[in-house]
Image: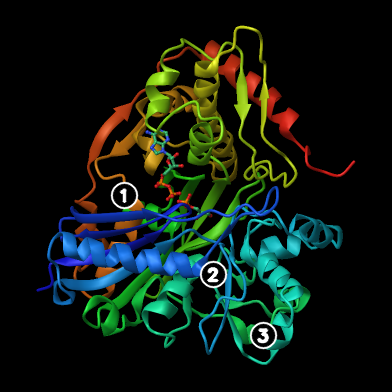
Amino acid sequence: MAKYVMALDAGTTSNRCILFNEKGELCSVAQREFTQYFPKPGWVEHDADEIWASMLGVAVEAMNMIGATAEDIAAIGITNQRETTIVWDKETGEPIYHAIVWQCRRTSEYCDSLKEKGLIDKFREKTGLVIDAYFSGTKVKWLLDNVPGARERAQRGELLFGTVETWLIWKLTKGAVHVTDYSNASRTMLFNINTLEWDEEILAELDIPKCMLPEPKPSSCVYGEADISYLGGPIPIAGAAGDQQAALFGQTCFNAGEAKNTYGTGCFLLMNTGEKPIFSKNGLVTTIAWGLDGKVNYALEGSIFVAGAAIQWLRDELRIIESAADSEYMAKKVKDTNGCYVVPAFTGLGAPHWDQYARGTIVGITRGVNKYHIIRATLESLAYQVNDVLEAMKADSGIDLAALKVDGGASANDFLMQTQSDIINAPVNRPQCVETTAMGAAYLAGLAVGYWTSKEDVVKNWAIDQTFEPQISDEEREKRIKGWNKAVKYAYGWAKED
Ligand SMILES: Nc1ncnc2c1ncn2[C@@H]1O[C@H](COP(=O)(O)OP(=O)(O)O)[C@@H](O)[C@H]1O
Ligand SMILES: O=P(O)(O)OC[C@H](O)CO
């Protein structure tokens, strides 16, 4: 029997390959960061060829690290930064432009025009989403409108669109398979989450030819095989899911009412709502969690655009920390933020505010505020943003979470986890394996090929590392949240033309 399942985790800032064994243990990990392009304020791009090359590189590296061969690998599961949009030539495989990243704001004004046409409710009912530059649909339109000749080529059937999992599957199969999974399709703003089909009316509104779209499929099924020239054998590609949905699966939130929060580049709180979509009245989006065993599970999601990225900003732009992990002991050098709040709305504000024109701001600066206060306030901003989303989730679902399951790179930060528990006034549970995104992708792939036999088979692999309990008074919590609410207002609308 094969020893491992391979998870390919295509994140916003790095690609990772992890080989998991049957117990859900990490047997090999390889990771590479890739280039971030910021061609204009608010614009973010990646090089799709670099994403592919670095992913193939980490896959080979992870296998070599433990001497694994293709025969040792039962299946490949792919999970990815969602919404990021790639359009390429069907014959040559050449991308026609850089990948437009989920964080990119270039289509904000076009989104405004859709809202002004009175289409907000229509988009919500069909796609579960709010109209925002975050999602892929308007990015595809931008490419067709702005790359010379692109629309004509797309209409002639010469171009293909995909989010990152689609691109990687297409590359791995040498152009034989052009598919997406329901969870990723539900982030495009082109997919009808009720009928599980591309929505003709929306495609007509955005003037996007259907022939360039991938075939939507369940999240756990064999899509094709990796070409033998890449990993030495025809390994089945058997699972795919957006990274946040994969993390929900990896955290074994299989039942309605179960939720997790992932602290990566952004922060994403998802609650499984079962087999029926719940449409939000409080600024959350409705999304497909996964398609599995002939059924579809839905989730409510609060998407926060900047979380760990704010820590990277402290490191790379302000240069007041040397590594992300340093933020923890530096924040603890001071007892509070000295009245200072950082609102990291660098690419607008997502849930529950949805302000495309908000921008980052620091308020409450006095003569005594030093870099430690700024670092602390930046870490605390992650906890406040999550609290905003959790409040909306409570209002929409009527469920007050008994505890919050967490994961993602920044969940390693104990100061942040303690602050999170203090601010939401509930326990925060961190699992032993915080690579739940990759784990979810591995489970989805492993279930499709019988490496694991059922969801119950994997639940026993989940174990707690640490629980953080609230430690502040109600009075202090209320005072701090009040200050945050005031600070957020200053970030609103900043980039809007006067
Ligand atoms: N100890 C830490 N404290 C705070 N932030 C951290 C820590 N370790 C990593 N991060 C942040 O977490 C992010 C990386 O997490 P990861 O889950 O790998 O993200 P992604 O999948 O979005 O690339 C980075 O933005 C980094 O700044
Ligand atoms: O790269 P991550 O892990 O921050 O995830 C990005 C999200 O998928 C964007 O929707």
Disc 2/disc 1 C-alpha distance (Å): 23 Å
Q: What is the quadrant of residue 186 in the picture? A: bottom right
Q: How far apart are marks 3 and 2 (CA)?
A: 19 Å
Describe residue 151's horizontal placement relative to residue 242 as left or right.
right
Please provide percent x and percent y for residue 448.
28, 74
Report whether 327 appears left or right of 430. right
Residue placed at 42% from the left, 88% from the top?
176
Residue 213 spot, x, y in % from top left: 58, 80
Name the N-terminal-most of marks 3 and 2: 3
Query: Residue 196 lies in what quarter of the image?
Result: bottom right
Of callouts 3 and 1, the N-terminal one: 3
Q: Name the residue under label 1.
A: 435
Labels 3 and 1 touching (C-beta < 8 A) = no
Q: Residue 185 carries which label?
A: 2
* Helix, strand or loop for disc 1: loop
The label on residue 154 is 3
- Which amino acid type is shown beneath numbered disc 1? Glu
Q: Which residue is drawn at 61% across and 13% down?
A: 339
In this view, 308 is above or below 297 = above
Instruction: Note whether 312 is above or below 53 in the view shown.
Output: above
What amino acid type should be assigned to the residue bearing mark 3? Answer: Ala
Quarter in which the C terminus is drawn: top right
Q: Residue 156 carries which label?
A: none
Quarter holding ligand 1: top left
In depth, the one of 355 and 467 nearer the eye is 355
